[in-house]
Image (cartoon, helix red, strand yellow):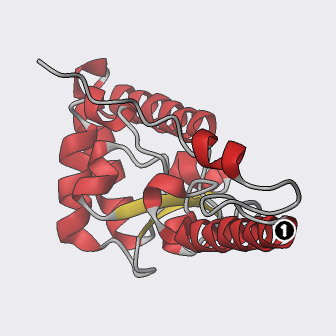
Amino acid sequence: MAKKPRNRGDAGRARAAAPGQASPGQASPGQAATASAVARSASTAQLIAQSGADANPATAAYPGQQFGLPERGPMSVATMPRRLLALLIDWLLSMIIAYWLTRSQFWTIAVFTVEVYVLTALTGSTVGKRLLGIRVMRTGGGPVGFRWSLVRTAILLTVVPPLLSDRDLRGLHDRASDTIVVRL
């Protein structure tokens, strides 16, 4: 079996060329500068194309960017600690109401469910969310409404799915109801 000779690039041709003269596979100094400039402009074009991809959720720089929300201030995505504290306030309020009405904490989950469902559907804020300056809204900007509030509340009561959040800090209950929690 015969071996093919290895191609070592243009080394053989470079040796045959006269000094100061470019061989057929090599660029002259002027051509090398032009090729370098073309390579730089190509990489700049690639950077510009990549920066235009910021609308893609996978490349979003901050939560809520793909929905057109600001990075900070009013209407920015609420942080997870703020949301959890609002949930805790709502739960404690539900315990107090349940105990006041029935002298038992057994009804806390029912009071909590009604509070979250009705107040989210009507105002987008529960008592805890209102105290912490956050509210729920549809990703399109509209109110949540009774149907989507029902979906959101039902999934919220399962406890674990709301903790599984995406890049926009939306839990499974927010994704299922197409909502997002923002600051006021």
Please tell me in which quadrant of the rendered image residue 27 appears.
Answer: bottom right
| Residue 104 visible somewhere in the drawing | no
Percent from the top left, x then y, of residue 29?
86, 65
Label 1 crowd bin: few (<14), some (14–19), many (20+), radius 10 Å: few
Type of residue at label 1? Ala
Residue 88's place in the image compared with 112, above or below, is: above
Residue depicted at 79% across the width and 74% down the height: 34
Residue depicted at 22% across the width and 55% down the height: 176
Q: Number of callouts in the render?
A: 1
Quadrant where the C terminus is found in the figure: bottom right
Percent from the top left, x then y, of residue 54?
57, 67
Quadrant where the N terminus is found in the figure: top left
Residue depicted at 33% across the width and 31% down the height: 98
User: Along the line of sight, which residue is nearer the eye, 183 or 176?
Assistant: 176
Please tell me in which quadrant of the rendered image residue 163 appears.
Answer: top left
Residue at mark 1 = 33
Q: Residue furthest left?
A: 1
Residue depicted at 44% across the width and 37% down the height: 7
18 relative to 143 in the view: left or right: right
Residue 152's place in the image compared with 42, above or below, is: above
In terms of secondary structure, where does tag 1 sit? helix
| Residue 179 visible somewhere in the drawing | yes
